[in-house]
Amino acid sequence: MKKTLAVLLALTMLLGGCASTATGGKEVSGEFSGTAKGFGGDVTVTLKLESGKLSDVVIEGGGETGTVGGRAMELMAAGMKSGNTVEVDRISGATITSDAVLAAAADALSASGATLTPEETAVTQAMTPGTYYGEEYGKWKAGTIEGERFGSPAVIGPTKVAVTVDETSILKVEVLSCDDTPGFIEPCIERIPAAVVGRQSIAVDSVTGCTLTSQAILSGVSQALTQAGANLAGFSKATPKTQGAETYDCDLVVVGGGGSGTTAALTAQEAGLSVVVLEKTGKVGGESTCSTGMLTLGSKHLQEQTGVEPTPLYEVFNEMMEWASWRADASVVMSFLKNNGETADFLQSKWSQTDNPGFTRMAAPKNGMDTGKGVAKYTVLYEDFIIPNGGKLLLETTAYELIQDDTGAVVGVKARRQDGTEVVVNAKATLLSTGGFGGNPEMLRQYLHNDNFYLYGLSTNTGDGLRMALTAGAALTNEIAPHLAEFCSNPVVDFYAGYMKFINYTGLLQLGPNGTRFYNEEMGASDPLAKGASALYTVGYAYAVFTGADLDKLEAEGCAGLLSEQTRSEMNNYRPRACVPFYTIKDEMQAAIDAGEGWKADSLEELGAMIGFDPAVYGPAIEEYLAMAEAGEDTLFGKRADMLYSLDEGPYYAVRICPALDGTLNGIKVNANMQAVDEDYTPIPGLYMGGYDAGGLWAFPYYQTEHTNALTQGYSVTSGRIAAKHIAETLGK
């Protein structure tokens, strides 16, 4: 039996008043366009008006992620057309794309001079009853080599769903398989299918922090409904927000459930403090899920497992300070190193009581231990300790404002759940550990003067902690820097999933934006993090240039096809994982060409013209390089002779590369106790910082010293413990 579903697709948004009266009262007809910056480039909305009504809406944004931004553009276009309005709901998980669509649509409508009257549209569903199937790749794409490192299968398959319907309704949604990252997929599988059925909508909220997996499930559901004959406009209601409120009282409120926040919560509970943890995403672990291990200087566990005495603290301290040229805060560095090993042993004492092994591989010369990537190592700490011991964990709850009393002391936090519930946490102390601002392009432009990165870290790290602390009177450190990954990437094409990200490891010719060499490319192979990535960051982006013969060698042997065994053996930092056949490299090259981020030409002159180089600059640079390659001597930068690769025979290739970003280093100034301080180093009462948010340890570039590794994760957990111990002492616990 057919049933009419009345769907009000025109909901009030933040763009009130965007339409204007038609000139002279005439009903406008024609096509009008507007453009705004989206996630991956420009998003253009074209409105087709017939006698003052929307007859069609076309949204284009080739740089937007297909299953996220692409899906948002599709649903928003359908909503605008069906509701005769440009004021439609944002699509959960695609905020940046949604905002671009709304802004571009508003500009297009303003250009038309028309006034649109929203219409309540009745959508009639007449599906063929049965079970239908859909599939879509989420976090990990077909052929990825990275998923296995995070616990996913070696061979990645798409997320598959089954959707059962009758003539008018969605009866059941089941996730049949999902190869995305363990720890990320579980909350999606638990929540998304139930929400789709309960809301009868494919526009339900994504699980925060698990957007790609959420959208893969929803995309599969959309495919299945289309097969059933559904009108998707009738299943596109956004989840309404509530007007609820919650209040909590505790000794310590932790903002951010990553390594820093988790360790702080455990430490505070050990001291008898009550704890509330606010986590923005739908899972715990934060940026720490991307980490493989951590520095553990002075750890008894490390010494017991290896029998190796730890490097003296003063020696490591001096190495770090010399590397940083004393731009780091010595008091913060010393506090970290003094507490580092004990913090590792504290965590291992917890892990040893669970089914998680904790530390597995030891690196005694570097004073570090590995935990492996993923969510499990932190999930178990909540499930076995923090929550059973009375701790409160609020997932998908974003803190947005600190509460201060009349003296300026921080006495709590205001937050908002994803469903709109307002949350107030009154606390005697507050720890902000929100992961820096790697996911905030505006802040990247403001503080790093560049947003041309591929984000390897978490997009949910948007600077919430820094913004709140600054508002409370805290000061920024003098040196905020990117936490670069050692490989390269591209802002449009996903090199991360395949082998192209290792192209900088080869020492191939690299040209800066103006078409000239900008560093000794050997450093991309010998020291890809501290020097290679830093040089690439300095120029913003570059072009790797190579031949078809080079591409063949990479496909057959990886970097080993270009770099001799002797060369690799003489480079202490060389990466063995790049010495395997790059079996997908030609497909990746073609994908770059198709996206306008790669080029193929029969001559070097043609290649430069295709990229857009000024021949007056590019020509001499190429001639100089060819002469040095023929002579076997790099008279410009001194690169090894065997890495002056020949460019005698085409075809020729180039691919644009940019830095890959884990996050941001340094944030709010802190003292040795991790208390946030103002410009005069006076502590802000009640306010503490942890992890990426706690500044002072870092100086660009990332430390590369003889006796340290995995400093980011080591500092994250240690700063959380330092803060919690000081809070307990201050509160007399």
Image (cartoon, rainbow, N blue to C red):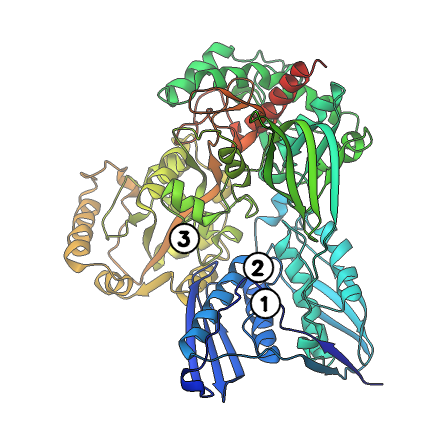
Q: Is residue 618 left or right of residue 368?
A: left
Which mark, by number, is residue 94? 2
Image quadrant where residue 235 sits: bottom right
Which residue bears the numbered disc 3? 553
Residue at (53% x, 82% y) in the render: 56
- Badge 3 marks a residue whose secondary structure is helix
Give coordinates of residue 83: x percent, y percent: 61, 78
Q: Amino acid at mark 3?
A: Lys
Q: Is residue 717 above or below residue 597?
A: above
* The label number, if any, that marks residue 50 in the structure image: none
Whether residue 692 is situated above or below residue 678 in the rendered picture: below
Q: Nearer the viewer, mark 3 or mark 1?
A: 1
At horizontal 72% and vertical 55% (from top left) the residue drawn is 242
User: Of the residues tagged 1 and 2, which is closer to the observer?
Assistant: 2
The residue that label 1 is drawn on is 71
Residue 302 appears anywhere in the view:
no
Count every numbered label the image shows and give the total.
3
Q: Amino acid type of disc 2?
A: Ala
User: Do tag 1 and tag 2 residues touch (Cβ < 8 Å)?
Assistant: yes
